[in-house]
Image: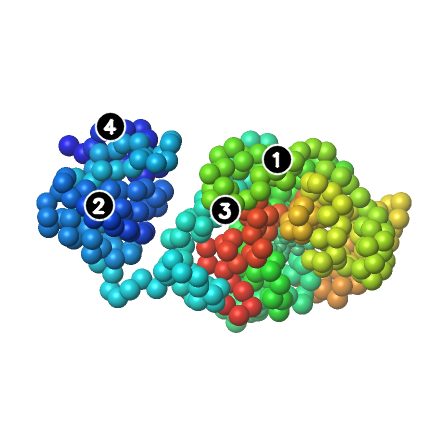
Amino acid sequence: MATRTTIERIAEHVGTEVELQGWLYNKRSSGKLHFLEVRDGSGVAQCVVFKGDVSPELFEAAGKLTQETSLRLTGNVREHGKRKGEYEVGVTTLTPLAATVGEYPISPKDHGTDFLMDNRHLWLRSKRQHAILRVRAEIIAAVRDYFDSHDFTLVDAPIFTPNACEGTSNLFETDYHGEPAYLTQSGQLYMEAAAAAVGKAYCFGPTFRAEKSKTRRHLAEFWMVEPEVAFMDLQGDMDLAEDFLVSIVARVLERRRPELITLERDLAPLERVQKPFPRISYADAIRTLEEAGTGAKYGDDFGGDEETVISAKFDRPVIVSRYPMDLKAFYFKRDPDAPLLALNMDVLAPEGYGEIIGGGQREDDLATLEAAIDHHKLPREAFGWYLDLRRYGSFPHAGFGLGIERTVAWICGLPHVRETIPFPRMLNRMSP
Ligand code: 4AD
Ligand code: MG
């Protein structure tokens, strides 16, 4: 009796007969042999049909299989004829389950990005996309494990919200039983409430931004993890972000090396993601940009190009802190030593992948926060509950948000975020 297993585990079955279920990925034939590349979701294996081992009908049927036909087969696991350390299957029986209706649209030839994005539901089956899905899942598991094992409590934030967190210009508005509601831009404000309940809180979920931006780093829907810690200041926030990122990268290197190799990721820059990260001020960053002749001047915000110039000076992530308050959201605490500056920080990934973390210390003084809400022309009614956090036992606190897709792009070495999420939502795309 053949043992049912998966391709990922066939090395455990060398010398025995196994049963696999999957799809035909690729095929080539030469005389008495058909080499079927079969994928089953866990991996891809070469399955060899030798004319001398099977019935003439089976041999002929195997030769006619089309790409992505689903099938079940049994065969003997042995070391690969040419590639040491790899295993192949000598097929004994093979049953096609469902043939393809017409030709599979994605052939091994090069297709344009639009075509592949239109066929994203099928494109996910390719080796490259498979590797990205696995790395993404590993990053998410590492994120959760990090916080769960550092005394944080997961507190879920809502998706429908009555108030803006990151400015009013990029809100998706929806109708909530006759009332306007927005899709959340960030769970932060809710995590501030949660931090007062559990001390160290984090949320992890989808967030939405409606800016009409077409850059390689913008999605309309992206996943963000947001820790928030009571009695932590900006310094502690930077320490947390650093320790967290080092641990995420180490975990992916440890567990998803084969996938990174499939993606042809240069591992050396990832191996260098070690403490301490360089820490510079916004003012230092502006000096770097001036020296590089970028035309940026004090008071400007950074786009992708500026972030690339800043991060090029360092061989690991760099933390940039204390931006002008004018560039930042209403909730940041001002630097007591320089009230025009925010106690904020961004972490820029190396190799030009740009900002992956944004966060900082929050304003904890009621009157100052009320003034900031007014200054940003936000409706004070919508923030009544948030101001309560400053009315009833206000406390210093800080946190940050890490964007999962930009992190996946960086760790996988992908130029665009569109491949980092299974079904991307972008300015011009909401399908499939
Ligand atoms: O810098 P952001 O806007 O910060 C916040 O939302 C804070 N409220 C987080 C907090 O302190 N709890 O976003 C945080 C991160 C960015 O650094 C980036 O990685 C990601 O979220 N991000 C996006 N990713 C993809 N597409 C977009 N449109 C993104 N906007 C932000
Ligand atoms: Mg930001």
Can residue 197 be seen at all in this image of the molecule?
no
- What numbered label is drawn on residue 263? 3
The C terminus - image quarter: bottom left
Coordinates of residue 60 in the picture (x, y in percent): 15, 52
Read off the residue under disc 1.
271
Q: CA distance from mark 3 to mark 2?
A: 30 Å
Q: Is residue 8 above or below residue 181?
A: above
Q: Residue at x 85, y 53 (%)?
A: 291
Q: Secondary structure at mark 3?
A: loop
Label 2 Cα crowd, 10 Å radius (few <14 / some 14-19 / many 20+) = some
Screen quadrant of the N terminus:
top left
Q: Nearer the viewer, residue 165 or 243?
A: 243
Dot 4 amino acid type: Gly
User: Is 413 placed above or below 251 here?
Assistant: below
Contact between labelled residues 1 and 2, with CB atoms less than 8 Å apart: no
**Does residue 71 appear to the left or right of 426 in the view shown?**
left
Q: CA gap, disc 4 to disc 3?
A: 31 Å
Crowding at mark 4 (Cα within 10 Å: few <14, some 14-19, many 20+): few
| Secondary structure beneath label 4 | loop
Residue 313, relative to residue 415: is it above or below? Answer: above
Distance of mark 2 from mark 1, alpha carbons? Answer: 43 Å
Q: Residue farthest to the right?
A: 337
Of mark 2 and mark 4, the one earlier in the sequence is: 4
| Residue 166 place in picture, x, y as percent | 67, 59
Q: Nearer the viewer, residue 333 or 38?
A: 38
Residue 107 seen anywhere in this rendered image of the structure: yes
**Marks 4, 1: nearer the viewer:** 4
| Mark nearer the N terminus (3 vs 2) | 2
Q: Which residue is mark 2?
A: 33
Q: Which residue in the rendered view is the most extreme toward the front? A: 31
Q: The residue under label 1 is which amino acid type?
A: Glu
User: How far is the residue under mark 4 from the one under mark 1?
Assistant: 37 Å
